[in-house]
Amino acid sequence: MTTLSNLCRFGPRSGALVLAGLSVAQAAFAQEPAVSAGPDSSAAPAASATASEPADASAAVTPAVVPSAPSAPSAAPHPIADSPEGDAQREYELGRLLYENGDYAGALVRFLSAAKTSTDPRLLWNAAVCEKALRHYARAIALMRRYLASNSPLLTAQAAASAQIFLAAAEPLTARLEVSVNVPDASVYADDEPVGKVPLSSHARIDWGTHQVVVKKKDFTDYEQTVTVSSSADVRVSAILRPVVHEGRIIVRAGSGDLIVIDGKPSAWGTWEGVLTSGLHDLRVSSGGSRPYEKRIVVADAQTRGFDITLEPAPRGSLPAWVWIAGGTLLAAGVATAGYFVFKPADTQDTVRGSIRTVQLGLH
C-alpha cells in the first residue's frame, strides 16, 4: 500500500496494457496513471500492467524526454501535481485518491472538473484512463483525441506516441457512427449523450452493444433508431426529420340553425370543420330561443378535436335571438349541454357526450 505522500501522479508514460478479458494481442492501451512524485526522479519506466492493475506508484517516473536537437535535450515538463491551482488542484487531488481506491467513475468526475479550469491537458489523459477502466472506450477515445489536439508544450513526443498506441488499441472495440439526414445542422445523440452535428466527424464512435441513436433539430420531429454494435464495422443511420406542424383541426357539430363563432368571428351554421393554430381559442355556439354555449378550447399540434353541441332552451323572458348572436359577442350568461370527441394522430376516436354536469366536472 502506498502512502499518501507517495500516491501516483497521473501523466503520460510509454507502455501498453493488455485489456482484461480480451484474447487479441493488438487490444492494448498505453496506460499512464503515474509519474514521479517529484521532478528529479531518474528511475527507469515502470513495467506494463493489466487494465485492472494500475501501475505501481513507486515505479512511476517522469516520461523520458525527446530532445529537440541532438546537442540540446529539452527539459522534462513539470509534474502534473504542480500544475493545477485553486479548485482545479483540489479536484485533481480528490480524483487521484479516488482512482487509487478503484473508484474510476468518481475519479473521472473530478478530473473532468479540474480540466474545466486548468490548461494542463494531462487531466484529459487521466479522464481517458478512467473511461477506459469503465470500459467506455468511445468516450476514452474522444478524450484522448482532445488531449492530442491541445498541442500543449506539456505534451511530449513520447506522450503523443503513447496516446496513439492508446487510440489504436481502443478503436477496434468501437464502431464508427455515420448519420445522414434530410436537413442540415441536425444534432445526433447516442444514449442521451451528444455525439455532434451532422455531418459527424470521422472520429465519431460508439461502443459495442445496443444503443439508442436520436437525431434532433428544432421545429422538427425527432428521429430515433436502435442500433446493435457487435464489431468494428461502421454503423450507418439514415434519418428523416419532418417539420413540426403547430396547428390542429377542430370539428364542431351543432343544430342546423345554430351559429358557430370561432375567436369572435362567425364561421358557419350547424357544422364547422377547420384548421387552427395550436394554442387557446374561443368557441361559441348560439341560436334564437336557446342558451348560448361558450368555451375556451385548446388546440394541440397535429391533433383533431371535435365537439357535439346541443343547446338548451332559453328561459322565458330571455333576450331575443338577435341579441344572443349579434356580432358574435356574449351578451348574457348561459351554459349549453355539450359533449366532445378527440381524434389523435393515430386515428383513435374517443367520443364523450354528456350533460351539463359532465361539463362542470371538467371533461371538456
Image: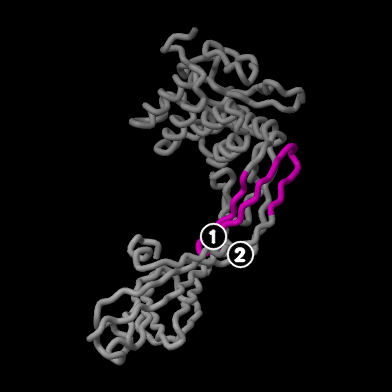
Residue reaching furthest bottom? 322
Residue 17, position in %: x, y? Answer: 66, 22
Q: Quadrant of the C terminus?
A: bottom left
Q: Which mark is residue 355?
A: none
Residue 132, position in %: x, y? Answer: 60, 29
Q: Check residue 229 for magenta coloring.
A: yes
Q: Can residue 73 be seen from the camera position used here?
A: no
- Marker count (numbered): 2
Answer left or right for 109 relative to 232.
Answer: left
Label 2 crowd bin: few (<14), some (14–19), many (20+), radius 10 Å: few
Instruction: In this rendered view, identify the residue nearer to me: 269 or 147.
Output: 269
Q: Tag 1's secondary structure?
A: loop
The residue under label 1 is which amino acid type? Answer: Lys
Q: Residue at x 45, y 73 (%)?
A: 307
Range shown magenta: 212-237
Q: Residue at x 60, y 15 (%)?
A: 46
Answer left or right for 248 relative to 64.
Answer: left
Q: Which mark is residue 217?
A: 1
- Which residue corresponds to mark 2? 183
Residue 102, position in %: x, y? Answer: 52, 19
Q: Are the two marked residues, 2 and 1, in contact with CB atoms closer than 8 angstroms?
A: yes
Instruction: In this rendered view, identify the residue nearer to me: 103 or 45.
Output: 103
**Mark 2 or 1 closer to N-term?**
2
Q: Can residue 20 be seen from the camera position used here?
A: yes
Residue 293 position by quadrant:
bottom left
Q: In this picture, is 117 found above or below 47?
A: below
Q: CA distance from mark 2 to mark 1?
A: 9 Å
The residue under label 2 is which amino acid type? Answer: Val
Q: Check residue 191 for magenta coloring.
A: no
Instruction: In this rendered view, identify the residue nearer to me: 9 or 282.
Output: 282
Q: Residue at x 56, y 26 (%)?
A: 12
